[in-house]
Image (cartoon, rainbow, N blue to C red):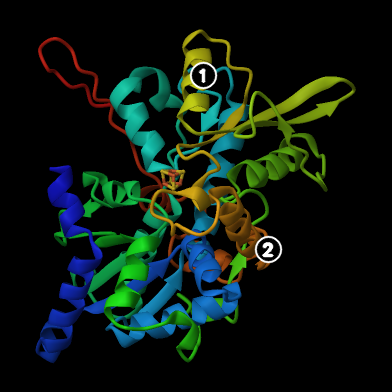
Amino acid sequence: AETVLITQQSHEELRKVLGANKMAAPDQQKLVVISVSPQSRASLAVRFQLNPTDTARKLTAFFKKIGAHYVFDTAFSRNFSLLECQREFVRRFRGQADPNQALPVLTSACPGWICYAEKTHGSTLLPHISTARSPQQVMGSLVKDFFAQQQRLTPDKVYHATVMPCYDKKLEASRPDFFSQEHQTRDVDCVITTGEVFKLLEEEGVSLSELEPAPLDSLCSSASAQEPTSHRGGGSGGYLEHVFRHAAQELFGIHVTEVTYRPLRNKDLQEVILERDGQVLLHFAAAYGFRNIQNLVQKLKRGRCPYHFVEVMACPAGCLNGGGQLKAPDMPGKELLQQVERLYGLVRTEAPEDAPGVQELYERWLQGSGSERAGRLLHTSYHAVEKAGSGLSIRW
Ligand code: SF4
């Protein structure tokens, strides 16, 4: 089933859909939206020796040339993922006595990690995983719900593809949780990797460097996109840093100016601590790569996990080093990663709550933060598959 799915979610499929869409009668045509992840943009920027803004504008020009109507940046939807994760953490921290409000909160943006958790340690891990949707799947809600309504279209009349640093994002987009039975459509119809964008460029005979840049699109009028923006913190989305700063302020009234990471066993396992008068108030960690994830799982199973919050990512060094990113045969992997990290961090950062358009969408689209709509459109659930001798599976 996974092979069929990967064939359906490929750059060949995207080309086929865009080609057929161009030829279709006007009333049969779909509105095509492509959402590009900032990690993919940084990888392409290194390959074509461009700055992030030029890369974003040239990618917009390229996708429009092959049939897209709008090109968005998943950095915008990530604002919602970060804010929802932050609210969930504060709520769970305050309700520590309630066993259903399990700490630590483990992040949910990495489908490689979610798949592992569901298949191997469901009953232990799932109560800990944040229910906030990943930036890709929040973008799915934004495009198929908010944006489709703006365009006076039903969700099935919009075709939504994303560009991601990762093959596992294809599996994430295909989860039944992100399929609308009512409209018979997925929130994200097709996921292609950064490497597949490169193949598309080659197949179209286009060099990104030589394309005329196009203006950037934005999802709502108050979020006019002049240039790409980013978050504070690491290249996998900045969950740890955003939630840490916010929780320090909201729970303890402490304003954190600088977040100091302390490396533990290796560079992919780091911790951040908030202390007052020698007492640990917040203990956060980032655990990247399966070696560190397995250690974390063992600690949790033995009831010896000291953390309140863990940013968990399956790839060593996180999403900038994802399996779908571009390789550079003539450059050592470490050097390539450093260059991608540098270009990723070269854009202006802003706090998610201050990003133009975010508050407006909470009010206009979601009827307020914490509303039933926000819960439905910005959160998800997980499903343990625990194989018993009989092949029985248990849904969480
Ligand atoms: Fe994908 Fe790796 Fe990022 Fe996980 S850490 S979302 S597997 S690129």
What residue sits right under mark 2 in the picture? 349
Residue drawn at x 58%, y 77% as measured from the top left: 53
In this view, 111 is above or below 20: above
- SS at mark 2? strand
The mark lying in front, picked from 2 and 1, is 1
User: Could you say where residue 96 lies in the image, as x and y percent from the top left?
Assistant: 59, 21
Q: Return the mark for residue 295.
A: 1
Q: Position of residue 208 (x, y in %)?
A: 45, 81
In this view of the protein, can residue 142 be seen by the observer?
yes
Q: Viewer-proximal residue, 95 or 267? A: 267
- Crowd tier of the residue under label 1, counting other residues whose Cα lies within 10 Å: few below 14, some 14–19, many 20 or above: few
The answer to whether mark 2 is within 8 Å of ligand 1 is: no
The reply to whether residue 101 is visible in this rendering is no
Query: Which quadrant is the N terminus positioned in?
Result: top left
Residue at x-position 35% and y-position 80%: 63
Name the disc covering residue 177, or none. Answer: none
Q: Would residue 198 appear left or right of 364 to someone viewing this image?
A: left
**Front residue of 231 and 4:** 4
Residue at 11%, 83% in the rendered image: 28
Residue 242: give x, y in percent of width and height. 65, 47
Q: Earlier in the sequence, mark 2 or mark 1?
A: 1
Q: Please give left or right for residue 184 compared with residue 221 in the image.
A: left
> Who is closer to the viewer here, 133 or 316?
316
Amino acid identity at mark 1: Asn
User: Which amino acid lies under the numbered mark 2 shown in the image of this protein?
Assistant: Thr
Quarter in which the C terminus is drawn: top left
Question: Which quarter of the picture shows residue 17?
Answer: bottom left
CA distance for labels 2 and 1: 33 Å
For this orientation, the residue located farthest to the right is 277
Q: Which of these two is toward me, 168 or 291?
A: 291
- Quick one: SS at disc 1? helix
Q: Is residue 10 left or right of residue 130?
A: left
